[in-house]
Amino acid sequence: MTHLDQLLDDVASARKRYTSAVESLTDEQGYWKPSPDTWSVVENTEHLYWAEHGGIWGMWRALLAKQNGKPVWEGELIHKGLPIETIIDHTWQSKEIVPASAAPRMGGPLAFWLSAFNSLQQPLHDLAIALANEDHETIIHPHPISGPLDIWQRYEFLRFHIDRHRNQVLDLM
């Protein structure tokens, strides 16, 4: 098993942990929030979908740009070789403002957002296949808060981000 295969499995496991934690909630439970500035389970799940969708799209874009000799990012790799937890510790506040593209905005049934969220494993898997013979450190897709991350760090981020929101929804329950 390659390192990228392991990262893909780690994301799949985090996705399963999240889904298992919330899939049995009723719609009423999914919409509940203790305060106006706290996201409900539905909002957390919708956010996970939009954030990961954009991240996967950005990684595909970065791969294609690199293959065409026009990388989307050039500069110092300030996080080179660091695990995502260390990068997050150095770059994130305790509560961040979500970029508009990743913000929950539609609402709707939890079952829909779980289905959409779980559907992202396939394009992530397909991307891993496309990356098989690439140098991960040369494909950079910047994160809006953390800055330049290589592809492996981006996969690590997906796992981290899903687990972070899993912990948030567990606190709601």
Image: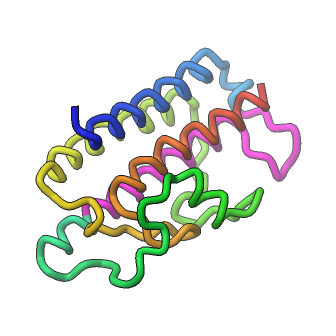
**Residue 25 against residue 82 in the figure, above or below:** above
Relative to residue 25, is residue 128 drawn left or right? left
The secondary structure that dominates the magenta segment is helix
Q: Where on the picture, by quarter, is residue 10?
A: top left
Question: Which of the two residues, 70 or 101, is positioned nearer the viewer here?
Answer: 70
Q: Position of residue 11 (x, y in %)?
A: 42, 36
Residue at left 58%, top 37%? 163
Q: Residue at x 58, y 69 (%)?
A: 145
Tell me the quarter of the image containing the C terminus: top right
User: Is 92 left, or right, of 17 in this rendering?
Assistant: right
Q: Which residue is drawn at 33% across and 58% down?
A: 151
| Residue 63 horizontal/vertical position (percent) | 22, 65
Which quarter of the rendered picture does the N terminus lie within?
top left
- Name the colouring of the figure: rainbow
In the image, farthest residue toward the right: 35
Residue in the image at 29% along x and 44% along y: 124
Q: Where 21 falls versus 143 (above or below)?
A: above
Judge whether residue 37 is colored magenta.
Answer: yes
Nearest the viewer among 102 and 112 is: 102
Residue 144 in the image: state x and y as whole percent: 53, 70
In the rendered view, would you say 52 is above or below 54? Answer: above
Q: Which stretch appears magenta?
A: 31-60
Q: Relative to residue 81, is residue 89 drawn left or right?
A: right
Q: Give the x, y percent position of residue 62.
A: 27, 68
Q: Does the magenta stretch include residue 14?
A: no
- The one nearer the camera, 72 or 35, is 72
